[in-house]
Image (cartoon, rainbow, N blue to C red):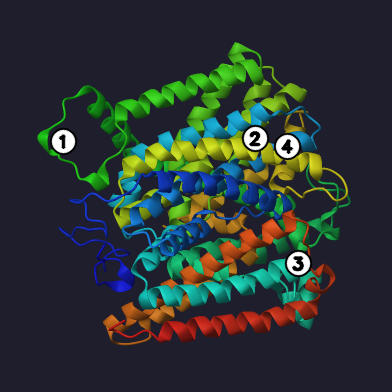
């Protein structure tokens, strides 16, 4: 396959908004047919789905971070095709990545909710885990398909799609080879080894905080003001691709949480003699900044995400209406000649089949709820309505979040789903043990649906940039979902038997513990922190009034500060690369090379993260925890992180107009 001689192998308008009348033509031309779905791509896709489902489940339950499978799978797919000297493998590699990447999103949906059943000492079985994951994944695929054209084609160049960008760069560099591949490989090795040393050995700290300085420590202790930066190159690379605009908005939300709200709660808490809130067990005056964030401020972030989601739904009402109208017209009206000649790269599953599959999935979910969760037709029907309404409405929110920052706020939206479903279930007479089981299973289905919607839009954007056939990606995504759901069901059962989720030496499962902590009081008539949710709602409305994207701002409020500040640093480097010279062509070349370096950091960090998780799963734990938690380790991390920043800037500046 002969690739176009353009920036990084992609067309020059791949990441830019299109001008009036301008058309994006992908690498695999729409007028030609390329190998995509073959025995090679399907079998390797299944293998990747099994392997990464197991690895992602372990890492997610152990450290709370679900590894993004798309990037390491793309690297392995490229490596396999290069090793076997397979020709025209780009389309096949997209299918391998798409099938295999089901693993990460299905795992996120399952491990954020299902382990809470074990934590609360409630009965759970394989078929509950498997079916909740399977049906949630199917809904995520089916609900997203009508919105594909809007997100991947109509919004071309308006969203950064950081994970999709990195994965696409890997696939293109692997196909094209040459200098682009070399830059990607070198930066991938540097970033991967750097992150591997942090997560596997702890030679220097992962998070650098202002506590390492004398006055910073005093501020943290007295005023609860703390500044943090995560030193992983993977997060830095995300920041470069996200760009300065969204990085500033995200960090603005984070700075509001950490430099205004946390100190404010601390000041209020100084005069309180009892814990604030029904679920708190500790005085605010005795809490660290991190504890105040987890117990109070993050709840405000959840309210902000929920309100931003509602605003997003309202703003997307025309998109939703158009999607429904498109489905209706395609099903009931005769197609025009123009519609019959639609381009290969714009073909989706027929809308009639899509609607029928949604109805079939809804029927299966109702049967599952009736026979295996609530054992009551009315309760099962209400549960089904909760799943369908929330999953459908928040599909666009999940897709937008991934398109902007590469992070899906699934845990925040799932917490809100649990709160709403628990409130509704209690009103219809379902509470106590059976109520908790029902709410968590419902939450699991919704969580998986939203996780899948966010992950799948990444796959479809990759396919759009490269020229894959969307219909083939959509059809074979169901296979990846089936394999991943079965794998994660077995893995959770095995991990519970091996480690457990409660007691000494157990897996941390932070998201599931948060779900358990939220749902238990709700099902025991203890009120949720509605005031905190309301504050978040008001903040989201205010930033919307100020014409600031509310979802990006609310994400910043909800996500810990150390994961947001590297985005700002990466965004500043990207801005610097694009504006350093008066020569626009040179600026573009530098920015493109920087994108390759950032993609390498993300790819290397992801791949070596998988290796680290597998080694820990095999019993190899070389982590020097005591040293890694010292201020000396943080100072060392500051030095090493500075060196990485200098390398990124230096390598970006090496670009030439003719490269």
Circle on res. 493: 4
Of mark 1 and mark 4, the one earlier in the sequence is 1
Q: Residue at x 76, y 82 (%)?
A: 213
Alpha carbon distance from label 1 to label 3: 63 Å
Across and down, in percent, residue 350 comes to 29, 31
Residue wearing tag 3? 224
| Nearest to the observer: residue 315 or residue 358 | 358
Q: Earlier in the sequence, mark 2 or mark 4?
A: 2
x 76%, y 67%: residue: 224
Nearer to us: label 2 or label 4? 4
Q: From the viewer's perspective, is the residue at label 3 or at label 2 nearer?
A: 2
Q: CA distance from mark 4 to mark 3?
A: 40 Å
Q: Quadrant of residue 425?
A: top right
Q: Residue furthest left?
A: 337
Q: Which mark is residue 340?
A: 1
Q: Nearer the viewer, mark 1 or mark 3?
A: 1
Rate crowding at label 3 as few (under 14), some (14 to 19) or many (20 or more) other CA atoms within 10 Å.
many
Q: Nearer the viewer, mark 4 or mark 3?
A: 4
């Amino acid at each position: 396959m002969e690739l176009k001689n353009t920036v990084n192998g992609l067309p020059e308008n791949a990441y830019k908004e299109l001008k009036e009348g301008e058309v994006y033509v992908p690498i695999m031309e729409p007028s030609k047919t390329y190998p995509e779905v073959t025995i090679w791509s399907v079998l390797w896709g299944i293998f990747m789905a099994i392997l990464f489902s197991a690895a992602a489940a372990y890492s997610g339950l152990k450290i709370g971070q679900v590894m993004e499978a798309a990037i390491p799978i793309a690297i392995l797919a490229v490596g396999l095709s290069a090793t076997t000297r397979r020709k025209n493998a780009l389309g096949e590699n997209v299918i391998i990545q798409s099938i295999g990447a089901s693993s990460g999103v299905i795992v996120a949906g399952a491990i954020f909710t299902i382990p809470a059943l074990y934590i609360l000492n409630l009965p759970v079985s394989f078929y509950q885990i498997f079916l909740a994951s399977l049906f949630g994944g199917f809904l995520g695929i089916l609900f997203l398909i009508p919105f594909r054209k809007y997100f991947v084609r109509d919004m071309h160049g308006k969203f950064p799609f950081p994970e999709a960008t990195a994965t696409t760069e890997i696939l293109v560099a692997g196909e094209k080879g040459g200098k682009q591949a070399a830059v990607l490989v070198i930066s991938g090795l540097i970033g991967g080894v750097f992150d591997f040393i942090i997560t596997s050995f702890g030679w220097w700290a992962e998070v650098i905080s202002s506590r390492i300085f004398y006055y910073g420590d005093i501020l943290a202790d007295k005023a609860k003001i703390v500044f943090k930066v995560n030193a992983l190159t993977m997060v830095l690379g995300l920041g470069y691709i996200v760009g300065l605009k969204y990085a500033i908005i995200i960090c603005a939300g984070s700075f509001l949480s950490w430099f205004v709200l946390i100190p404010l709660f601390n000041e209020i808490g100084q005069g309180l003699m009892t814990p604030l809130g029904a679920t708190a067990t500790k005085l605010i005056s005795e809490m660290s900044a991190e504890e105040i964030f987890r117990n109070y401020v993050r709840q405000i972030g959840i309210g902000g995400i929920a309100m931003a989601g509602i605003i997003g739904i309202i703003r997307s009402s025309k998109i939703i209406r158009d999607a429904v109208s498109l489905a209706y017209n395609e099903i009931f009206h005769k197609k025009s000649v123009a519609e019959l000649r639609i381009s290969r790269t714009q073909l989706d599953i027929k809308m009639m089949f899509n609607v029928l599959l949604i109805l079939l999935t809804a029927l299966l979910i109702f049967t599952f709820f009736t026979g295996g969760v609530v054992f009551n037709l009315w309760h099962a029907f209400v549960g089904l309505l909760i799943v369908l309404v929330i999953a459908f409405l928040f599909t666009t929110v999940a897709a937008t979040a991934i398109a902007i920052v590469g992070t899906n706020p699934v845990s925040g939206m799932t917490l809100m789903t649990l709160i709403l479903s628990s409130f509704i279930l209690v009103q219809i007479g379902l509470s106590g043990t059976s109520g908790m089981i029902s709410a968590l299973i419902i939450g699991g289905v919704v969580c998986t649906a939203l996780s899948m919607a966010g992950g799948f839009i990444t796959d479809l954007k990759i396919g759009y940039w490269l020229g894959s056939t969307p219909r083939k990606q959509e059809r074979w995504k169901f296979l990846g979902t089936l394999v991943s759901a079965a794998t994660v069901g077995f893995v959770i059962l095995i991990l519970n038997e091996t480690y457990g989720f409660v007691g000494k030496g157990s897996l941390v499962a932070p998201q599931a513990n948060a779900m358990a902590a939220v749902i238990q009081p709700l099902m025991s008539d203890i009120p949720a922190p509605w005031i905190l949710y309301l504050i978040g709602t008001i903040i989201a409305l205010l930033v919307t009034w100020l014409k600031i994207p509310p979802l990006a701002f609310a994400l910043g409020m909800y996500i810990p500060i150390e994961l947001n500040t590297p985005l700002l640093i990466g965004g500043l480097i990207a801005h610097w690369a694009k504006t350093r010279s008066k020569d626009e062509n040179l600026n573009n070349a530098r920015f493109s090379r920087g994108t390759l370096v950032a993609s390498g950091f993300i790819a290397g960090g992801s791949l070596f993260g998988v290796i680290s998780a597998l080694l820990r799963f095999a019993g190899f734990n070389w982590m020097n925890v005591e040293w890694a938690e010292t201020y000396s380790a943080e100072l060392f991390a500051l030095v090493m992180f500075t060196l990485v920043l200098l390398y990124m800037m230096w390598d970006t500046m090496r670009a030439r107009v003719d490269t």
